[in-house]
Amino acid sequence: MTVRTRIAPSPTGDPHVGTAYIALFNLAFARQHGGDFILRIEDTDQTRSTPESEQAILDSLRWLGLEWDEGPDVGGPHGPYRQSERKDSYKDFAMKLVEEGKAFLCYRTADELNELREARRAAGKQTALKQSDLGLPADEVDRRMSEGASYVVRMKVPEEGTCVIDDMLRGTIEVDWAQVDCQILLKSDGMPTYHLANVVDDHLMKISHVIRGEEWISSAPKHHLLYQYFGWEMPKLCHMPLLRNPDKSKLSKRKNPTGINYYERMGYLPEALLNYLARMGWSMPDESEKFTRQQMFDNFDIQRVSLGGPIFDQEKLSWLNGLWIREELDSEAFSQKFQQWALNSDYLMPIIPLIQPRVDKFSDVVPLAGFFMSGMLDLDEADFENKALDKDQVRRVLQFSLWQLEAERYWEKDRIFQGLSGLSKAMDFKIRDFLFPLFVAISGSASSVSVIESMLLLGPDMSRARLRHALNQLGAASKKEAKRWDKEFRALQAVLESQS
Ligand code: GLU
């Protein structure tokens, strides 16, 4: 059997370190077995997927030195590798299951579904909906059909019994069918759900091993059943432990920067970040901390992955990166890599128009633009002193802006500006006063170049990390205060939404 593994990102946001971590383990497993590693874009959610996000994911995985043998940009014998380009085929697979009595058309409305769930809850049963709940009398189905009512295709799922899944790391996992609902396979717009498209494509692309994050364990019974229904052999499953924040919660952008771009902008070497991701839950036989990608592949054994949640710790990453910088780079390589990082024209060109109008001589550049090449800024309370805002107002502006920016899915100039200026109005501040703490947090100075442009170039994670850092310097909200602020913030959001 040829080993074929894959990473299947959905292009709905910034490239995430978790995607790189899973990609690395899939690549290592494939290389260890002389197999292939495939990149497939799962963009069936047309409202959330964007080509920009897809490009950013490909770019950042490549920056890390991860390469794929087949994918949307390199082609391959099992393409297309973008699900939106395969969308017509999924319907046939769904309808085949309907013809064979393994799936059914469901005409239930959203209100009816809520009522059915409510009824199950009231009866003290699992809320997973079964065919016995969802079925309608034949004449009612005919009526809705003739009225052209919208429908979805759902898979049939046993009402009772257990589903047994084999996992390469966890052994057998048993799930009661009672917890599994009749999953939608085809949505009312004719698009497949993740479950259908993922199973069909893994089969057609001859994927032999599915190595993915543990958050997908609950999908495994549905996939298991789909493979059975289609009469296909199921790939071997391996659910990797999730990356965690230092407080053990699931790694999230609210607590830790999660974007690969952030780590690039912070000036980590891709080799070191990859080395660190390899250390997440896995160790070399000799327990060495610093090793190359090739050394990992030469020594790889998936059974050495430990299931205790690996902590993504920035300090540890910095320490490891320091080893790489000091031990692997001579002065020539250091100089070259530093120039490439700080002065590459992709990064520099959009900065020039911001600073050039203020520059009389080149020696003005570093004081003006140094914050574009920095990590966290050296700030203290005095930097935030201002006639119009007292310290608590500054803290509130920073915290509310941070929340506002955490909710921003697209990092675009107009959206950032509109979001923040709306917030400023709702908080009853003049925009100039409102922006003051942001200027200081982002650039270190109230008289710097446009703070919105700066945030745009620094990227979402770096901008948010600086706001969080500034807030910490001034004293982050206590639990009680955070609760009160959260309430206030929600109320402001509600006002803003009602106005838009
Ligand atoms: N599209 C899914 C994701 O975004 C893929 C999950 C899987 O590997 O099956 O991660």
Image (cartoon, helix red, strand yellow):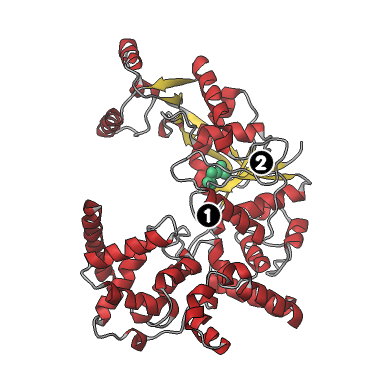
Measuring from the top left, give residue 192's x and y in whole percent.
49, 32
SS class, disc 1: loop
Pointer 2: residues within 10 angstroms few (<14), some, or many (20+)? many
In this picture, residue 109 sits left or right of residue 157:
left
In this picture, residue 345 sits left or right of residue 435:
right
Q: Nearer the viewer, residue 407 or 435?
A: 435
The numbered dot on residue 396 is: none
User: Which image quadrant for residue 446?
Assistant: bottom left
Q: Which residue is mark 1?
A: 242
Specify whether tag 1 is near ligand 1 (CB below 8 Å): no
Q: Which residue is mark 2?
A: 209
**Residue occupying the point 28% across, 69% down:** 479
Measuring from the top left, give residue 140's x and y in whole percent.
30, 14
SS class, disc 2: strand
Measuring from the top left, give residue 336's x and y in whole percent.
71, 76
Ligand 1 picture quarter: top right
Q: Nearer the viewer, residue 488 or 412?
A: 412
Question: Which quadrant of the rendered structure holds the N terminus?
Answer: top right
Cα–Cα span, label 1 and label 2: 18 Å
Q: Which amino acid, by three-letter code, is at mark 2?
A: His
Measuring from the top left, give residue 124's x and y in whole percent.
28, 33
